[in-house]
Image: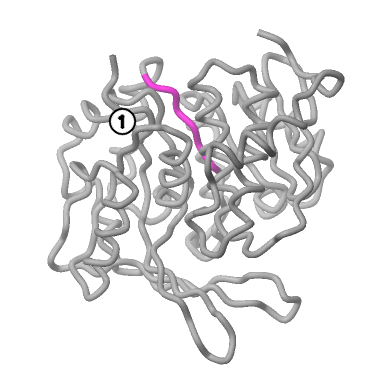
Amino acid sequence: MKRLDLIGIGECLVEFNHLGNGQYQIGYSGDVLNALAAARRLGLRTGLISALGNDPFFEGLRETLTSERIDLSHAPVLGDRPNGIYFIYLNESGIPAFHFLRKNSAARETFARQPLEALIDYVREARALLFSSIPLAVMHEREKLFALLDAVRGETVIAFDLNVRKSLWEDLGELRGLLDRLAAVVDVIFVTDDDDAMLFGDRAAERAIEEYGRKGFRQVVLRRGAFPTMVSSEGEIFEVPVPHVTNIVDTTGAGDAFNAGFIAARLLGHPAYECAAMGNAAAAASIETRGGRGTGVTIERVEKLYRPLVKWGTFHGPRG
């Protein structure tokens, strides 16, 4: 019996969300925190691998992580480093945009300041592990992360969110080059159409998902915003509809909530189609509230959005 359901590797961030008229609302976010918070609301026991900064925002961040019941036994507090910060604002097109201040953040020291064997033992206590390309880009001693993945492969479900942040890479070719190594250890990769376009240019969704499969990824999930999610699993490619939501408040963190929903369903033994439907429902619930942490995600709300997607007659994915 494993102690935890999901461990996330990543950087927690102090969030300043623009409310208008020069006013910002402070919060705490980051892709790993968002996903773990949503997963907890879906009933999963969660833990974090990171490092936290001892700065003026630390107490608020710790309070948030504690309130989300995220295990912090492998997220040490570093007195000589700050936490990363980001700002959410609307660009000229009215679409949320982001500005980051994270160059010397504590999270960069995650693997440098913790024994690798202790981290491996910790991940072995969990049923699933989630990380993105962000820790690949910002955390020092990257090879320790790959060593961890190699060590737990086959014992823990490994989920990877491509989540491309162009500003974190001097050359995106470096990230493209890491995909072959990741394909050998990752059980499911989450990609958005924007991620794919940044790495490989404009191409049809069908071609994109086939190319990830050819690289060796066993299960590929391509998120396309309001368009149906495309999934490749067990040699089949199929689409999964998204819920219709009219009360859209903030799309920040929707992809992170999707990951939580998908992983939660997978750990419950659902087939890939239903996992994607659960992910779509969790993402839809998350955009009904402000902030990246998806406070609108509840089991009741997600189930209500999920059920119409899997009713008889709409199931076209592989069974079993």
Residue that label 1 marks: 147
Does the segment drawn in magenta span residue 204? no
Residue at horizontal 50 percent and vertical 87 percent from the top = 23
Say whether residue 293 is left or right of residue 289.
left
Main secondary-structure element of the magenta-colored stretch: strand
Tell me where residue 287 appears, x and y as whole percent: 63, 56
Name the element at disc 1: helix
Magenta region: which residues? 156-161
- From this view, report whether residue 53 is shown above or below residue 110: below
Q: Amino acid at mark 1?
A: Ala
Say whether residue 74 is left or right of residue 268.
left
Tell me where residue 243 appears, x and y as whole percent: 75, 42
Q: Work out whether residue 216 or residue 88 is closer to the camera in this orientation and state it.
A: 88
Quarter of the image for the C terminus: give it: top right
Q: How is the image coloured?
A: one colour
Tell me where residue 6 appears, x and y as whole percent: 38, 32
- From this view, report whether residue 183 is shown above or below residue 65: above
Q: Work out whether residue 290 or residue 111 is closer to the camera in this orientation and state it.
A: 290
Q: Residue extending furthest right?
A: 313
Q: Work out whether residue 280 or residue 83 is closer to the camera in this orientation and state it.
A: 280
Residue at horizontal 61 percent and vertical 71 percent from the top = 97
